[in-house]
Image (tube, grey):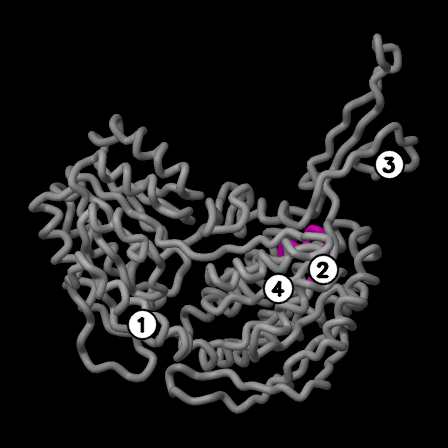
């Protein structure tokens, strides 16, 4: 049952006077539940509990923390149809998407549970002493990863489950031994509270300390700012806009004790298509990419917003075909009126730029909050001379850049901001000449895909979901996959410790 209150550790609390409601973009109406924004006192209470819980929780054996994560997954599944209905009414997304995202969320929890069954993920290193080494004896040094402390996680608008309350940031931080305080996203606060209830129940049932998890409501930015400034917070996880992520990053950097903000932000995910690929399978590529551009109404961080190729008659035909195929796909609801408005405004701004040609735009009548997909094209010179064309249009929108030659194409890539992904569509006979392109892309992206689409992020040990700024605030880390746990730990060395004082894995 959704109460509209905050989870402060194991307790429900609703002492504040600021309230708000979520919104159903399909019906274009507010949902009925009233949510109560967390007060500064409730924020302090959540952090006090988390700080008290930390020394207990960090020392709970990995197998018991794994049981906690697996139990969260079980409890989320037990929420049943209520969770799916709430997800749909708060996001406008379909039932299949809701169930798929629920499965991914539970899968991530189970993946991290499996990772921490043993302590090998903590990367133990043993460098034994050489007391008779000349001219200076060598000390005994042993190292492993230790958790940072309480972590604040910001729910994401476009993934109410997989990147939110019990999503990858929360799952990896809990796996690392860090208590988590979630700043619930206001667009899906009901979904967030239901998942928070599952986490709280799992924590109690598996003997976790009170304060290992809290969920705070917020209709604006004040609660998030207060959390990042709070001296007891040791790290932040964020998925969202460049503006929002950068604001949190700057707040964290100005603290007396600066803390890391691991923000995954904007990306237009360049796709490069070779001439041989266009000659051999242009129609197939256009079909595949029209579906990728419109998947989830274009509201994925890996949406292919930029396509690059060298000028040719084949490219001209491809652009027209891509436009026709894209607008032939039925329009869908966006997540919220604000997101729809931003999409319309940003798309119009790009289309109005000098040198931009609108290839195709969905022009059938649509309900409120439904996106009108669009394909535009520009020359390589126009793109290089106008940084406004480099910005993400969050939604079903893609720009095709027609480069003069290979040198200009490589220059365009070099001048891109940091991206999550880059994709190369090529034929086998192209492979021997791709290395310069791969190296240029490597400097700009976190992951390169060959002959695929960027939409769809596999949750695995080898996945990198991050990239140079502004794709993320620290390109050394990933927000998806096993390695995401490394954001919430730091290396720690024991020097000349007696055996009995060492952690078991370092003995």
Residue 400 at least partly seen: yes
Q: Which quadrant does the C terminus fall into?
A: top right
Magenta region: which residues?
Answer: 171-180
Residue drawn at the location 18% of the way across and 49% of the way down? 379
Q: Distance between the residues labelled 3 and 2?
A: 27 Å
Looking at marks 1 and 2 on the same chain, the residue that comes earlier in the sequence is marked by 2
Residue drawn at the location 73% of the way across and 49% of the way down: 147
Question: Pointers 3 and 2 in contact (CB under 8 A)?
Answer: no
Q: Which of marks 1 and 2 is in front?
A: 1
For marks 4 and 3, give the one nearer the viewer.
3
- Residue located beneath label 4 in the image: 73
**Secondary structure at numbered mark 2:** loop
Q: Kindly identify the residue that appears in the image at 54 percent across and 55 percent down.
A: 263
SS label for mark 1 = helix
| The quarter of the displayed image where residue 96 is located | bottom left
Q: Name the residue under label 3.
A: 502
Q: Name the residue under label 1.
A: 345
Q: In which quarter of the image is residue 296?
A: bottom left
Residue 80 can be seen in this image: no
Residue at horizontal 67%, vertical 55%?
235
Please tell me which of labels 3 and 2 falls first in the chain.
Answer: 2
Of mark 4 and mark 3, the one earlier in the sequence is 4
- Give the numbered dot on residue 233: 2
> Is label 3 in contact with label 1 (beta carbons under 8 Å)?
no
Q: Residues within 10 Å of mark 1 (few under 14, many from 20)?
A: few
Q: Which of marks 2 and 4 is in front?
A: 2
Q: Distance between the residues labelled 3 and 1?
A: 59 Å
Q: How far apart are marks 4 and 3 (CA)?
A: 33 Å
Quadrant (top left, top right, bottom left, bottom right) of the N terminus: bottom right
């Amino acid at each position: 049952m959704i109460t509209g209150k905050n989870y402060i550790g194991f307790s429900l609390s609703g002492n504040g006077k600021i309230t708000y409601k979520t919104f159903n973009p399909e019906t274009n109406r507010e949902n009925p539940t009233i949510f109560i924004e967390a007060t500064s006192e409730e924020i302090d209470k959540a952090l006090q509990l988390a700080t008290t819980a930390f020394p207990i929780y960090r020392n709970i054996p990995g197998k018991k923390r794994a049981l906690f994560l697996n139990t969260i997954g079980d409890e989320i599944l037990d929420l049943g149809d209520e969770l799916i209905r709430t997800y749909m009414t708060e996001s406008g997304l379909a039932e299949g998407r809701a169930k798929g995202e629920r499965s991914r969320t539970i899968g991530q929890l189970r993946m991290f549970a499996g990772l921490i069954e043993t302590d090998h993920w903590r990367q133990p290193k043993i460098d034994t002493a050489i007391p008779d080494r000349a001219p200076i004896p060598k000390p005994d040094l042993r190292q492993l990863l230790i958790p940072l402390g309480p972590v604040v996680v910001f729910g994401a608008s476009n993934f109410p489950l997989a990147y939110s309350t019990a999503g990858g940031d929360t799952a990896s931080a809990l796996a690392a031994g860090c208590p988590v305080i979630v700043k619930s996203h206001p667009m899906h606060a009901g979904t967030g509270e239901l998942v928070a209830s599952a986490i709280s129940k799992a924590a109690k049932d598996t003997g976790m300390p009170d304060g290992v998890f809290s969920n705070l409501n917020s209709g604006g930015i004040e609660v998030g700012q207060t959390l990042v400034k709070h001296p007891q917070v040791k790290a932040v996880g964020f998925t969202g806009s460049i503006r929002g992520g950068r604001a949190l990053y700057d707040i964290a950097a100005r603290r007396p004790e600066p803390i890391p903000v691991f923000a995954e932000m904007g990306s237009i995910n360049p796709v490069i298509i070779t001439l041989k690929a266009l000659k051999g399978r242009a129609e197939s590529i256009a079909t595949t990419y029209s579906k990728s551009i419109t998947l989830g109404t274009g509201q994925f961080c890996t949406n292919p917003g930029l396509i690059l190729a060298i000028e040719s008659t084949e490219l001209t035909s491809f652009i027209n075909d891509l436009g026709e195929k894209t607008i032939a796909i039925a329009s869908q609801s966006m997540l919220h009126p604000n997101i729809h408005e931003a999409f319309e405004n940003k798309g119009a701004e790009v289309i109005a730029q000098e040198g931009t040609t609108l290839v195709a735009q969905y022009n059938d009548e649509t309900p409120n909050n439904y996106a009108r997909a669009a394909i535009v094209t520009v020359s390589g010179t126009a793109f290089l001379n106008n940084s406004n064309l480099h910005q993400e249009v969050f939604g079903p929108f893609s720009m095709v850049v027609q480069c003069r030659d290979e040198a200009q194409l490589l220059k365009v890539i070099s001048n891109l901001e940091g991206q999550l992904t880059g994709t190369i569509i090529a034929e086998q006979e192209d492979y021997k000449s791709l290395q310069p392109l791969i190296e240029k892309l490597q400097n700009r992206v976190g992951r390169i895909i060959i002959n695929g689409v960027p939409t769809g992020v596999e949750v695995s040990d080898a996945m990198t979901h991050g990239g140079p700024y502004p794709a993320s605030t620290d390109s050394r880390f990933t927000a998806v996959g096993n390695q995401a746990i490394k954001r919430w730990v730091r290396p720690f060395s024991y020097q000349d410790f007696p055996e009995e004082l060492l952690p078991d894995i370092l003995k």
